[in-house]
Image (spheres, rainbow, N blue to C red):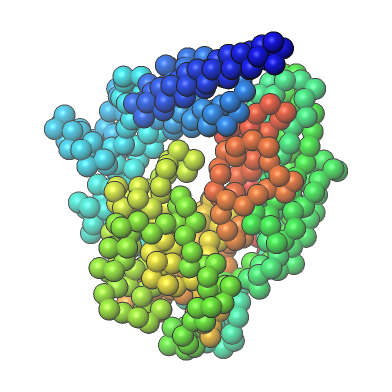
Amino acid sequence: MKIAGFIIVFSLFTISGCKQSIECDKRYNQILRYFSEGNFTQLKVRSDSLLELCTEEKQLLNKADSLLQIAERIEIDFSVAEDKVIMQIKGRMGDFTSEDKSLWENRNWLEYRMIDGEKRYFNRAASNLNLLNSFHNNRAQRDSLEAGDPEIKYRKSHTQLIINASEKQDGPVMPVDLTIYFTLTIDPDAVPPDKTVRCWLPFPKEGYSRQQKVTLLSSSHGNYIIAPDSSVHRTIYMEATAKKGEPLVFSASFYCRSSGQYFNPDRMIIIPYDKSSELYRKYTAEQPPHICFTERIKNLADSITGNEERPFETARRIYLWFSENIPWTGALEYSIIPNIPEYVLKNRRGDCGMQTFLLMSMLRYKGIPVRWQSGWKVPPGAKNLHDWCEIYFEGTGWVPVDISYGLQYSNNQKTREFYISGIDSYRLIVNDGISGRLYPEKRFMRSEPFDFQRGEVEWDEENLYFDKWDYEMKIEYSK
């Protein structure tokens, strides 16, 4: 009887567990539907009920929590109401008709999402619309304005000096000494008092001839840990305790020497790839979700390159296509985009990293090794987050390429196409790959899961997203 009774009790427990598991799956599928519909209020309600019922379903709870975090990030990126975006557009472009607005929305030049039944526009929708309108409809005016832009004029003269110096010597040239002060400030009471806050700040890579003499000068907290240079993302990590009503500040200062480099295509030695090498296999592989060989990407790459088999000319053809077809625009946070290359192709626009993801996908599909590189561009008066890449040519090595800088305004082909095989001196290299683990490892979902430039912050119970803190970089230059 005891055995029979045990079997009955066990059977009842199993049946009950199965029913609960079915109900948990049902609620999670509802969460997925609410997410895809933009019904974020109901998504939050259903997520709470899932947490109450399905305490043992850890994997399901983690997936639901990730969707909830992404929904919250979408709401932050798409926070502009329709009446406000109309005023923003008028301020930039003057009066327009409702037909104009409908046309822009249908082309997705004016980006919005339906959230809880309302149109919510991307925070940079108005400025991006102005950029896209200029690119497609006012090309001559846009070219004239960009050619006269002080940053672009300085860049062109600087890159010409790099070309000239590279004729006399191989390797990096035109060094610039940078002293960088980086500060990350967490909002008061973003973390409960007396809780430990974990913070990662960007720190320069050392394994590159273009970036030398890296030296830490100071840190706000003495318990810092600098990640090994072999880490995908180079960081300096610190901990501190939150205090009630006070901002929490993490900072570090460091020195490095950054140089430019130019590879003259006429002098590059390029031999057939060793396709059995580890390097070739690693850097021609897909890295989903953002380095991928979808049918759209493969068809486009093939249509651009045709029968061309020479690696440099293949890369050059793709680069020239970008300059004519994919304008730079401000980007959504990468963590809310399921597939960045497909987004760029669908919308025909993207920022530096989005363009780089698409470029890398196309090149790797064509059997050309390419790796991510990113950190900051740091020219005087124009510092900003920035992404680019390096292409490997057998016989020459790694060659830097900046797809979003595009062609320069010059009749000299080398100057015009500088960024197909060159890089300026104003770079801070922090990353040489994507989606790496932070050091020490982060416990919660990162604010930026793929790249690392602004920093990352968390405490015992959650990640702190970008809306809870701010960052600042100051630079002193010497040559």
Q: Is residue 415 left or right of residue 137?
A: right
Residue 381 visible somewhere in the drawing: no
Image quadrant in which the N terminus is located:
top right
* Residue 359 location (% of width, % of height): 40, 62
x and y percentages locating residue 226 in the rendered image: 77, 52
Q: Answer with left or right where residue 305 lies relative to residue 158.
A: left
Tell me where residue 140 appears, x and y as whole percent.
Answer: 23, 59
Name the quarter where the C terminus is drawn.
bottom right
Of all residues shown, which one is farthest toward the right? 222
- Residue 125, position in %: x, y? 34, 37
Q: Nearer the viewer, residue 392 or 163?
A: 392
Foreground pick, 449 / 456: 449
Residue furthest toward the front? 1
Residue at (41% x, 61% y) in the render: 361
Asked if 410 appears above or below 458 in the picture, the reply is below
Residue at 26% across / 75% down in the picture? Answer: 306
Q: Quadrant of residue 196?
A: top right
Residue 90 occupies quadrant: top left
Residues 6 and 205: in front is 6
Res. 285 in view: yes
